[in-house]
Each structure stands twice: as C-alpha cells, then as structure tokens.
Amino acid sequence: MVQGCGSDVGKSTLVAGLCRLFTNSGLRVRPFKPQNMSNNAAVTADGGEIGRAQAVQAQACRTAPTVDMNPVLLKPQNDIGAQLIVRGRMHGNWTARAFQDRKAGLLDVAVESFQRLRGEADLILVEGAGSPAEINLRAGDIANMGFARATQTPVVLVGDIDRGHVIAALVGAHAVLDPDDLAMIRGFLINKFRGDPSLFADGRAEIVRRTGWPDLGMAPWLAAARRLPAEDAVVLERPGRESAGAGVRIVAPLLHSLSNFDDFDALRAEPGVDFTFVPPGRPLPRDADLIVLPGSKATLSDLAMLRAEGWDIDLKAHLRQGGRVLGLCGGYQMLGRRVTDPEGIEGEPSVAEGLGLLDVETILTANKTLRPAIGRLAGADAPFAGYEMHVGETEGPGRQRPFLIHADGRTDGAVSADGRVAGAYVHGLFDKSEARAALLADLGAASTPGDHAAEVDKALDELAEMLARCLDIDAIARIAGL
C-alpha cells in the first residue's frame, strides 16, 4: 500500500507507474483504492463509476477497470458535502460530518472488494488517501491505516520533496502514528526531486536514522506524469497546467464543481490549440474561437456561479462576434432553456432558467446514467468513443438536430439552427483522433493523429522505466511478498 505524507504527493502516479512496471514483468496486477474523493471519474466495464486515477492504473495493468478497484468514492458537491458512490452506484448526498461518523461501516465493503481482486491477481497495489498522519481522522479510517491493518497490507510512505520540509513530514509522521499503525510501514520513498540526487543523500540518511525505515529510493520530477489524466481539479488552479500550443484558442470557465476535466487533455496536447481554463474573476476572452462549458457535479449551483461571474454575458458577446460554444454533460444542460430539480438531487427542489442557447430543457432525476458510448458525430463522418455519466434527462425541439449518433441508433445532444452552439452528454469526445480532427477542422485547425489513450499508454511505459531506475524495486517486491 502506497500512503503519503499528504494529498497530491504523487501517490496515484507512483502506483500507476508501479502497476505498469510489475505488469511488464509478467505479473497479474490490479490497482485498488478503498476510499477516494474526486469529481474526475470513469465508467467501468461492469457499469459503475470509480475515480479516474484507478481507471488509469487499470490501464497500466492492461485490464478493464471494475468497481472493486475503488469501492467507495466521494464526489464533492459543495464545501461541506459530497455524493457517495458505493461499488459504482450512487448512495445519496452526505455531509462531511455524516460521512466521518458513519464511514467505519464501509470498511467491510472495501475489504470485500479487495478480497475479490486478490482472487484474480498476483499483486495488488493499493493507494491511500491524504495522509495517515492526520490522526484526528484515524477513528473509523478506511482509507489508510484502518484498511492496511484490517487486511494486513504492508505500507510504503511517500514524501514530496518539491513542497519542502520532506524530512519533517516523514519524521513527523513517525512521531505521531500509533505504534500498531507505525508497525505497518516497511519503508519510505521520496518523490518529485529536482536536480542532483547526491545533494539530498544526507537528508535521506537522516530520515533513516530518525525513523528506522528502509530507504526505498527517490523519484525525480516525472515529466511523463503530465500526460496522465489528473484526478484532482486543484491542479488546474496552479501554473503550468495549460497547453503549450498556439493557434486556435479554446477556453473553458473553471466552474466551482467542475467534473471530468480530463475531457480536455487531448486538446492540451495539440500543438495547434491554445487551451485555457478561465478562473473566477476573469472574463471569458473575446478572441476565443470556441468556448466549452465543461461537466459539472452541481449544474444548478455552477449555472448560478456562471451568471454571478458575468460569463453568461461573455458567452452571448462571443456568439455575436461569430464564435462557437460547446457544452459537455452539465454544460449541455446549462445551454438549454431550463433546468429543473423536482426531487432535490442537488439540494432543495428548485428550477433555474438556463442560458437559452439550445431549445431543450433538463429534468434532474435520481437515476444516474453510466454507460460507455460509441458512435459518430452527426455532422461529420467521424467516429467517437467515450462514456456517459450524468443525472438528468434532456428533451426539446433542439434534439431534432442531434450532435451525436450512437452505434445503437440513439441520438444525443442538440445543435442550434445556425450550427454555432452544440451540446451533448458524452465525455471523452476529443480522445479519438477522428472525432478530434473533425471538431478542430470546424475551427480551421489541423489535428495530430493518434488516439489519446495511446499517448497515455506511452507515458505509463516511460514512468515504469524511470521508476525501475530510481527505486529499489527488488525491496518493494519483497515487501509485497513476491
């Protein structure tokens, strides 16, 4: 089990790289995360949803993702509450306090899923969440030491040197952990080192002296990790995450409850595309060629945010100047005339006027649609492959001009009469090269060939090769009982 001294220390990336490394060695490997918190989710082969990171780790293992790989998923809807997903299915909305009081009851769910995976694997690589040193959250824990001790899974602890104070983080964890929790840790790793590794040799030795833990190696700043889908939207608020391309300008508002933002990873990689998330407090740029309204975990509150930021005015000005608008999932719902929540799916029952750019209306329902999607763009002879993950049904006259045609004959989405506004429920529209090329051609841009999944696969191989060079893989294998 890979645990960390905090969130975003690189646990997901290290597990993905190790999954590919041990898979390449001929082992049957499976990823597992007992509890995750992310609005970036993926549809599984068995018709549920799990965190995006575990889906990428499954790809690293060259196997299809299943709900057992992430049996408990929290999808934040506001600052104090989240939608609870258990084995891929929605189980209502919980406040942080309610979840903290009741999460221990989900340990059996996590252990049962773990045991099922054990039956099909030579090795399971488990990812923790946050930090085991958050001892105020230890009671009822299922994400870190609570799970490790329940399954007797040995732990490797990761420290992030890029943040600084990595010695204090690792030694501090050693100081505050309960003795029985402490006994689960079999070694430590340093992650995200930049520069000459020999300059930190004394620091690593000091960690060993103060903790007694074996030093399992130090990973450099892994450039290939930038080509993997990120799990947490917080990375979008930091510099260095936008595309390096130049040419056609595509922007998306950084909504408060933004979800499935990896929809745009393939665009970021295009040299002919300048893609940018626009943060709150800034207008949507007038010189954009395309404005994309992304998916949202809370359509109604993000629609209100969009108006509060004045982005609705920016959208209409953009269209008056001949621009284009595309809505994906929640963004598609916002483009219609009205969004109704009669059952209080996102809070109190309510109705909100949409942006009125598509002649459709949405009713939010308790049933969540989760399914893979393949088909063709309605306006081009180009195949797409993605997935649907949404609450609500959208109907109206605008549906007579669909944006997508599924392989089974179903249609999805709507297109405005002038063709400059479109929306649909399918995520991953830009991943397949033919669909991406057709969508960019409408903007006057060329596309590089190759499906995005193949690029992710190359990045995973690069990660595996780098970790093989810088970590003590033999020692890690012994800890895992191989």
Image (tube, rainbow, N blue to C red):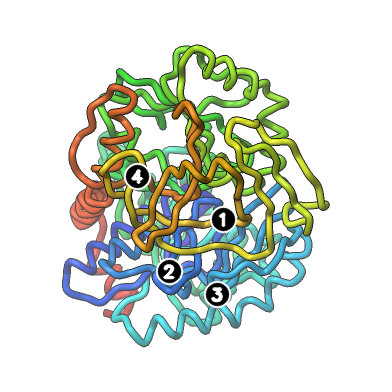
From this viewpoint, is residue 165 visible?
A: no
Specify the amino acid type for callout 2: Val
Q: In this view, does 227 lie to the left or right of 96?
A: left
Q: Which residue is drawn at 64% across and 31% down?
A: 356
The image quadrant of residue 94 is bottom right
Number of marks: 4
Q: Nearer the viewer, mark 4 or mark 1?
A: 4
Q: Which of marks 3 and 4 is nearer the N terminus?
A: 3
Work out whether residue 387 or residue 141 is closer to the camera in this orientation and state it. Answer: 387
Q: Which residue is drawn at 42% across and 38% down?
A: 162
Name the residue that disc number 2 marks.
Answer: 126
The relative height of residue 81 versus residue 246 in the rendered view (above or below) is below
Specify the amino acid type for callout 3: Phe
Whole-angstrom CA distance, mark 4 to mark 2, is 39 Å
Labelled pair 4, 1 in contact (Cβ < 8 Å): no
Q: Which of marks 2 and 3 is nearer the N terminus?
A: 2
Say few, some or many: other residues with alpha carbon within 10 Å of mark 1 (under 14 / 14 to 19 / 20 or more): many
From this viewpoint, is residue 250 visible?
A: yes
